[in-house]
Amino acid sequence: MDTAAKNGHLEVLQWLDANHLFRCTKPAMVLAAENGHLEVVKWLHQVHHECCSSGALRRAANSGDLELVEWIYANVHMNCHHTDPYMYLDTTIAASRGCLDVLKWTHEHFPGSFRSDAMDAAASNGHMDVITWLFENRREGCTASAAFGAARNGHMDVLKWLYTHYPKTFVVDFSDVVNRAAGNGHLEVVRWLHETRPDRVSTHALHFAAAEGHLDTFLYLLDHLNEGSSGDVHRDARGIKVLYHFNLDDSGDRRCNRATGDQLKMLQAIFEQRPAFVRDWLQYLVHLACSKGNVAILDWVSQFGIELNSTKPIRDAASRGDVKMLQWFLENGFEFTDPNLLRKAVLTGQLEAVHWLTKHGHDVNSVKLTTVGYNMPILRWLAENGPPIDLSTATKLVLEKHHVEIAWWVSEDNRRHLVLEALHKNDRKVAWWILAHTQFQDESALRSIRDAIRCCPKDTQKWLKKSLSEVEACRWYFAMATKRPNEESGETGLPSTRRRRHA
């Protein structure tokens, strides 16, 4: 019923009511109000007045539907909850959605509902009309979150207005505002912030732009910032070398030149003046692109030449299952000789990467099944495509780790040993699974298993008899169990217990 109200299915609610299946709940009207279903709210109020809830007005305000808000206020709130001394509305959501008419109504009827987060929310979403109205009619102001949100979402007009009317919100966290804009690639915002307060823009902004792959913003900051990056920031990039072949063109490079003329001129100029600065940050850009699988950035930098002094970036790509990155490394001539690549993909459960690596020459026989852990899809694939599973491996996987399904890929003789060990340890789950899924052909195996069952505790024998009596693969046991006492008593003429071999 609540779902029908939430989704505005009035006819469903009416049918439930007509068939005496309607059960009123407080959330029904609240959910209908939250999702703007005025007709459902009206029907609930008229037919099932007991469904009325004080939360309906709050949720209606969140929906931004002024008509709904006014109707609930006049017909529900004033009749049922007008004496609630704690009643207030959440203006944050309405402000974030730009619902100025609802905010004006709230200002008139529930003036105590406003907090500074209303302007913060409006600024984050670029609603200048809401911001200016709050500024002119309320006194709560805003916090630094307003500038953060506006910068993060690229609202230049809002940032400029905030800088004029609430400059104190920028005093402490100006550099963080720049970082938010850089991290989301808002170049014009970054440019304006840098021109406004160049002394408050740090190389941290370069990190944020590089981390998210915003090349234009990264290059602008690289051009306009002075040296001063920390060596710690680039520690992870030490295994990467950029060759800085800035003069390559379409005829001289193995791939088309992706840098524009302006980009090349700018990079050359900076490199001539600050080679260490450019070297550090381009290598760091490559490191982050490798870490995040940003092939577009790698394609751009690779035109200048990239060398890897270790296989760590390739190992990391295998560990996180980034097949797209593995393909890029392969196509760009990087060696895949690291014997641990397949093992890394297996240990982190990256089945798609395992497929890719084995397809490109990595030996599945190099992976020990016992090191895989509890990832059944990986285990199954390795069992199907790897070497035969020996008894030691099968024992550890099936009996110790209880990967019982691995027994599918174990030989009959090794299954016999697993059953005997399971019976000895009174491991009913393993014993039952193998017996129920195996058509044993060897007579000596049948006898040894039968004898082991006879040595089990009586309750285990009874459990096995009950659990396996209807299993086709286990009929041999019950036939032999019947024959044995009859033979001991001298009776003859019973059918042979030798089981027909299955194709």
Image: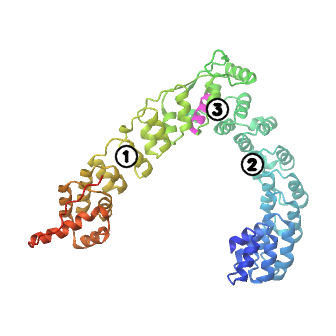
The percent coordinates of residue 120 (x first, y second) are 78, 55
Mark positioned earlier in the residue sequence (2 or 3)? 2
Q: Describe the colour scheme in one phrase.
A: rainbow
Mark positioned earlier in the residue sequence (1 or 3)? 3
Q: Residues within 10 Å of mark 3 (few under 14, many from 20)?
A: some
Q: Residues within 10 Å of mark 2 (few under 14, many from 20)?
A: many
Residue 503 lies left or right of residue 254; in this view the side is left
Amino acid type shown at disc 2: Phe
Mark 1 and mark 3 in contact? Answer it, CB < 8 Å.
no
The percent coordinates of residue 338 (x first, y second) are 43, 31
Write the start and end of the magenta stretch as one range: 280-291
Main SS type for the magenta part?
A: helix
Mark 2 and mark 1 in contact? Answer it, CB < 8 Å.
no
According to the picture, the residue beneath numbered tag 1 turns out to be 383
Amino acid type shown at disc 3: Ile
Q: Secondary structure at mark 2?
A: helix
Q: Secondary structure at mark 1?
A: helix
**Front tag of 1 and 3:** 1
According to the picture, the residue beneath numbered tag 2 turns out to be 148
Q: Is residue 91 visible?
A: yes
Amino acid type shown at disc 1: Ala
Mark positioned earlier in the residue sequence (2 or 1)? 2
According to the picture, the residue beneath numbered tag 3 turns out to be 297
**Front tag of 2 and 1:** 1
The percent coordinates of residue 251 (x first, y second) are 66, 15
Residue 295 lies left or right of residue 386; in this view the side is right
The percent coordinates of residue 333 (x first, y second) are 52, 25
Residue drawn 9% across and 73% down?
Answer: 489
